[in-house]
Image (cartoon, rainbow, N blue to C red):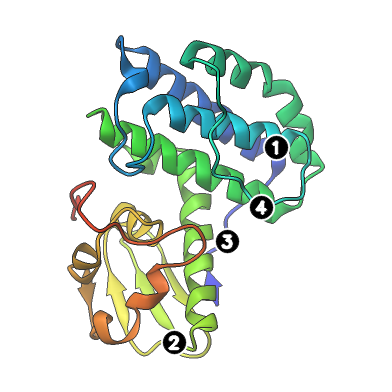
Amino acid sequence: MTAAGTGHDPAEQYRAYRRTRQNITGLVTRTPDTAFAGVPACPDWSVRDLIGHLVHICESFVALEDNQIDLRPSEGVGLPGLLDRWDALDGELREALDRTPELRRRILLLDVFSHEIDLRVGLGETVAPHRHPAFPGALDLATMGFGLALHGGNLPALRIDTPERDWVVGEGAPVATVHGPAFDVFRSLTGRRTWHQIEDLRWSGDPSVTWMPAFAWGPFAPPAKEVEPVRGF
């Protein structure tokens, strides 16, 4: 599997995470009663639940726990308390990043960035991922995870082509190419696009026959119904 290089320095990752946390805090405190709003990309969660999840993940990361990322939201604390706790973890997080393997650091950023976008879409806010410091690394990790799913499913290699970058994922020479905007590719790889929306990307082969099973990998799977529109080129 090949891909363009992306820096994963802990100091840069800390700055990207902190920026994302601050963005999310601004989003959820901008209007009253946001805590009880739904999040289409996470249909079982309210905004408060999603923030509880992010705080729980940050606490686990700071504690250097070895378990896989736990999707359970923190319980029994209101939104203001959760945001205060998240802010208080900032210094400990910086130290933990220096002591944590690279892959786990990258997963942390992928999770928090994905949920910032979930919140922006759900709250009708502007989405501008290309200017976000967490986006390149999150997209790179998503393509890597998808490539591992191809390999694990004995599926042929695929070229993913966006206007900015391209990747060859899977083992061997690619037998087809999927073209799309980087944002739509990212959301397709991370369970935010339906099967139909994924098929509507520009494919040189038939995705429904060959590659679609790999879009369900790790914690991700295409939703049963549309949670956000395709942005397109």
Distance CA(mark 1)–CA(mark 3): 28 Å
* Closer to the camera in the image, 202 or 163: 202
Task: Check disc 4 and report the residue beneath it.
Answer: 68
Q: Is mark 3 on a helix, strand or loop?
A: loop
Q: Of circles 2 and 4, which is in front?
A: 4
Task: Check disc 3 and report the residue beneath it.
Answer: 5
Residue 156 on image: x %, y %: 43, 88
Residue 155 on image: x %, y %: 44, 87
Distance CA(mark 2)–CA(mark 1): 34 Å
* Closer to the camera in the image, 172 or 25: 25
Task: Check disc 2 and report the residue beneath it.
Answer: 155
Which callout, 2 or 4, points at the residue further toward the start of the chain?
4
Which callout, 2 or 1, points at the residue further toward the start of the chain?
1
Q: Which amino acid does label 2 sit on?
A: Leu
**72 horizontally vs 35: left or right:** right
Distance CA(mark 3)–CA(mark 2): 24 Å
Q: Which amino acid does label 4 sit on?
A: Gln
Q: What element carries label 2?
A: loop
Distance CA(mark 2)–CA(mark 4): 26 Å
Which callout, 3 or 4, points at the residue further toward the start of the chain?
3
Distance CA(mark 3)–CA(mark 4): 25 Å
Residue 144 on image: x %, y %: 53, 67
Q: Residues at badges 2 and 4 in contact (C-beta under 8 Å)?
A: no
Residue at 29% over, 31% down: 38
Q: Is mark 4 on a helix, strand or loop?
A: loop
